[in-house]
Image (spheres, helix red, strand yellow):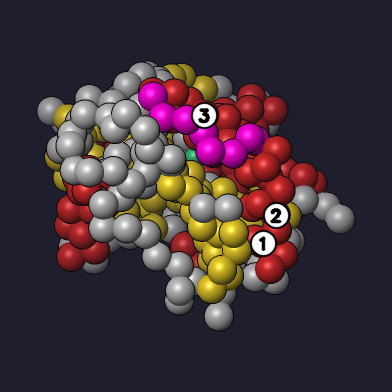
Amino acid sequence: MPTCWLNGTFCDESTASVSIFDRGLLFGDGVYEVATVVRGRLLDADLHLARLERSLAAIRCDNPLTIAQWLETMQALVNANALDEGLVYLQVTRGVAERDFAFPTSATPTHFAFARPKRLLQDPAAAGVSVHVVPDERWARCDIKSTAMLAQVLAKQSARSAGAFEAMMHEDGVVTEGGSSNLWIVQGGTLITRPLSHDILAGITRDVVLELAAGAGIPVLERTFTVHEARTADECLMTSASSFVLPVVTIDGAPVGDGAPGTVARTLREAYIERALRLTAP
Ligand code: PMP
């Protein structure tokens, strides 16, 4: 049985449970992170934990663990599950209290983490994925990695029902981001992605890819782009910790460019994997 971490102890996933009065359950009053594991080691966990601190500060919730304690716990979880390649999910909620919207006067944050295997280096999706365009129906603080994700659940279900891999969310025809990824296009060799604001999540992979693009001499423009521009771009890409860099080869069934993974997507995915292998080298 896989081992998880719940409120300070490791336990079987089958026995781990939280109260029905947990504010994460009642209000979505919590935040989370997903970090990657390659060759049994955490990748960029420090960056994910820094974002966790930012999310917690934004919702005015204490971090129950120090960064060092999180790092130790996450690696112990990886080891306990003998995880070679995959993901560690962690969540912090404001804790258990009588149901009242305003903050409880005293509550101990609930925190837990679990690990899951996933093929990352040899991901079959690297052959190219499809997206389905949907309106972005989320709130005004998409920079907070909140567990309240009903709009993304609906967006990704629409994508699934349409036979697509990911949702391309837009506001009035302007792309915000994917259901659980940042989106990019390539126009005439220039890589374009939406600038950071309250409208999107500051993807850890997005940051790394910006650095890799600079290193590879790929010109980058941080600006908004439209769904129409994505449909007529030379390439479209998505990035996330759990997918690295994936070429988007169709939008609502129509090919992007020639419908095959493009040079920029392939270059950046290779650079991302090379960096991941370097950082997780034994
Ligand atoms: N945007 C959204 C809405 C997401 O859920 C994710 C995945 N966490 C991302 C972007 C990508 O972020 P990251 O690269 O840190 O995984």
Instruction: Report how far apart the C-alphas of labels 2 and 3 lie in the structure.
Output: 19 Å
x 28%, y 43%: residue: 97
Residue located beneath label 3 in the image: 53
The reply to whether the C-beta atoms of the residues labelled 2 and 1 are less than 8 Å apart is yes
Crowding at dot 3, Cα within 10 Å, few <14 / some 14-19 / many 20+, comes out as some
Q: Is residue 135 above or below residue 217?
A: below
Residue 49 sits in which quadrant? Answer: top right
Front residue (pair 18, 142): 18
104 left or right, relative to 46: left
Looking at marks 3 and 1 on the same chain, the residue that comes earlier in the sequence is marked by 3
Residue located beneath label 1 in the image: 78
Q: Which mark is residue 75?
A: 2
Outermost residue on the right side: it is 282
- Badge 3 amino acid: Glu
Q: Is residue 239 above or below residue 66?
A: below
Crowding at dot 2, Cα within 10 Å, few <14 / some 14-19 / many 20+, comes out as many
x 79%, y 46%: residue: 278
Front residue (pair 20, 92): 20
- Badge 2 amino acid: Gln
Secondary structure type for disc 2: helix
Q: Which residues are magenta?
A: 60-67
Q: Main secondary structure of the magenta part?
A: loop
Looking at marks 2 and 3 on the same chain, the residue that comes earlier in the sequence is marked by 3
Q: Is residue 119 above or below residue 60?
A: below
